[in-house]
Image: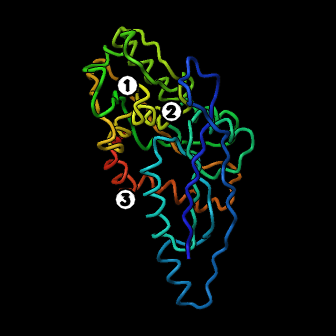
Amino acid sequence: MRRFTVVTSIITAGAAAGTLAGCGSSSPSASSATSKAASTGTKAASAAASATGTAGAGSITVFAAASLQGSFTQIGKQFEAAHPGDTVTFSFGPSSGLATQITSGAPASVFASAAPANMDQVVKAGDASSPSDFAKNKMEVAVPPGNPAKVSSVDNLSKPSVKVALCQPQVPCGTTAAKVFRNAGIAVKPVTLQADVKSVLTQVELGNVDAGMVYVTDVKAAGSKVKGIAIPSSDNASTLYPIATIKNAKNMSVAREFVDYVMSPAGQKVLAAAGFEKP
């Protein structure tokens, strides 16, 4: 029986300023995938494997941005169903931290980043080449369902009375939020800086803050746990998501097939349903 494993890793890259009590981070760890060779005992089995694209079947480890957790979990399940014998293991976290892990030798097969800059870091280190953009995401303000601070626009986040959670500045969601604030001409002083966008969303869901800057996809995934405050297109900012196989990855053929699946109509359908836009 195939096993589908999701490993969530949270990386704190830099000290958090003004962190709320109880907020913290844990050290990331990428799951090590064990290679599994596919074998067929008859000509009929070989023909079936060829028809389903399972040549070179085995396990791969995909390092992916935290904002991709929901959609990539679904894509991984579909990929395994379409490629019997292949196993996908995920390590989710902030793209900046995942890039550092890869360039430090972590055994990743594929990297899906929430920003080109973090992918560039991996490419410049010689660990990947020829990345492809597969999605785009934009920002949205998330508030608790009751909206206790009565936040009605992104401009309200500059009020001293509004407790705001942001991603750390080197993380893509933090970098993109900063662009929004520049576009809106406001200065925002957060009460907490979180390791990734899912951690920001959690702070909003728990009611620890009045608002958080997250992606449109995160608000959609949270459902009734948060309320989204749209940001005008004139003030909003977006980020591209590139993906690439990692040099010297085990089961490279499977890694390439996974990247192809993300780029395929089936993969793009999952991403669109989650709220991602085409790049």
Q: Which residue is mark 1?
A: 211
- Which residue is more in the foreground, 241 or 129? 241
Report the quarter where the C terminus lies.
top left
Task: Please name the residue shown 52% across and 44% down the image.
Answer: 243
Residue 161: percent from left, percent from top: 37, 12
In the picture, residue 60 is in which quadrant?
bottom right
Three-letter amino acid code at the position of disc 1: Ala
Residue 165: percent from left, percent from top: 45, 24
Task: Please name the residue shown 46% across and 41% down the image.
Answer: 67
Dot 2 and dot 3 residues touching (CB under 8 Å): no
- Which residue is more in the foreground, 212 or 160? 160
Reading the chain from its start, which is encountered first: label 1 or label 3?
1
> What kind of colouring is applied to the model shown?
rainbow
Task: Please name the residue shown 60% across and 32% down the image.
Answer: 24
Reading the chain from its start, which is encountered first: label 1 or label 2?
2
Q: Is residue 107 left or right of 191 when viewed as pictured? A: right
Three-letter amino acid code at the position of disc 2: Ala
CA gap between label 1 and label 3 equals 34 Å
Task: Please name the residue shown 58% across and 32% down the image.
Answer: 118
Number of residues whose C-alpha sits closer than 10 Å to that of mark 2, classed few (under 14), some (14–19) or many (20 or more): many
Reading the chain from its start, which is encountered first: label 2 or label 3?
2
Q: Which residue is mark 2?
A: 115
CA gap between label 2 and label 3 equals 23 Å
Q: Which residue is mark 3?
A: 266
Q: Is residue 112 left or right of 176 when viewed as pictured? A: right
Three-letter amino acid code at the position of disc 3: Ala
Q: Secondary structure at mark 1?
A: strand
Residue 46: percent from left, percent from top: 56, 84
